[in-house]
Image (cartoon, grey):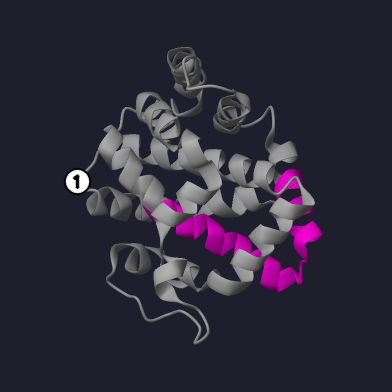
Amino acid sequence: MDLMDLLQGQLSGGMVDQLSQALGGAEKEKTAKAASGITSLLMGALAKNAASPEGASALSSALDRDHDGSILNDVIGMVTGANRNTGDGGIDLNRMLNGAGILKHVLGGKQSGAIDMISKMSGLDSSKTGSLMTMLAPVIMGALGKAKRDNNLDSSGISDLLTGSVKRNAGNNPLLDLATKFLDQDGDGSIMDDLASMGMKMLGGLFGRK
């Protein structure tokens, strides 16, 4: 199973249209670029967090408690609030849809830098990039929770799934490579301009087909 493929598959043209509308009419191409960048970034961050047994165990517990995958049944309805009734009885929808809380846990102090990077890379306004990241975080966790349930994965299995998905796409996904470089940096993001510039060059070919 390749979780990256699953998540990128969720970002269909119709989904991007709805996300653009939810952001107040953002440009679709910029929304698509930002959404792909956010997906790659959060997948990389989750893989990094789950690399240790403690991190993998904490992630596995969070998936069991809050992320059953039901958000995938109606992504837009759930993240925009139009439909908040599809979670299983044992799932707290407020926690499942708490994108801000997920981002704080997954990205920590790198969150603002990540928003700046993806905003520069995609051309999407930073406030809309932040909103989009908050919308997509529960979707990514939901996809991971669904994979956990469907395949009966333990914490080690979750770690292997994330690491495997990231490794398989390394070198072929410029967004993921950019995200990995960002996540591996220490400090306050002083190389942000260099990273964004590199990302724009890579993305020129990637999105030139649209």
Q: Residue at x 31, y 47 (%)?
A: 131
Report the magenta stretch's main SS.
helix
Q: Quadrant of the N terminus?
A: bottom right
Q: Residue at x 78, y 53 (%)?
A: 53
* Relative side of 14 to 172, left or right: left
| Amino acid type of the residue that numbered disc 1 sits on in the rendered structure | Gly
Q: Residue at x 62, y 47 (%)?
A: 46
Q: Residue at x 29, y 63 (%)?
A: 80
Q: Helix or strand or loop: what does disc 1 sit on?
A: loop
Q: Which residue is mark 1?
A: 25
Quarter assignment of residue 33: top left
* Relative side of 65 to 155, left or right: left
Rendered view: 65 above or below 139: below
* Relative side of 76 to 203, left or right: left
Point out residue 118 in the picture as x, y percentages from the top left corner. Answer: 41, 31
Point out residue 54 in the picture as x, y percentages from the top left corner. Answer: 74, 54
Q: Is residue 145 magenta?
A: yes
Point out residue 113 in the picture as x, y percentages from the top left corner. Answer: 43, 29
Q: Is residue 179 magenta?
A: no
**Start and end of the magenta stretch?**
135-164
Q: Which residue sits furthest bottom?
A: 89
Q: Quadrant of the C terminus?
A: top left
Point out residue 23 in the picture as x, y percentages from the top left corner. Answer: 24, 48
> Mark 1 Cα within 10 Å, few/some/many (few <14, many 20+)?
few
Residue 22: tell me if it is visible.
yes
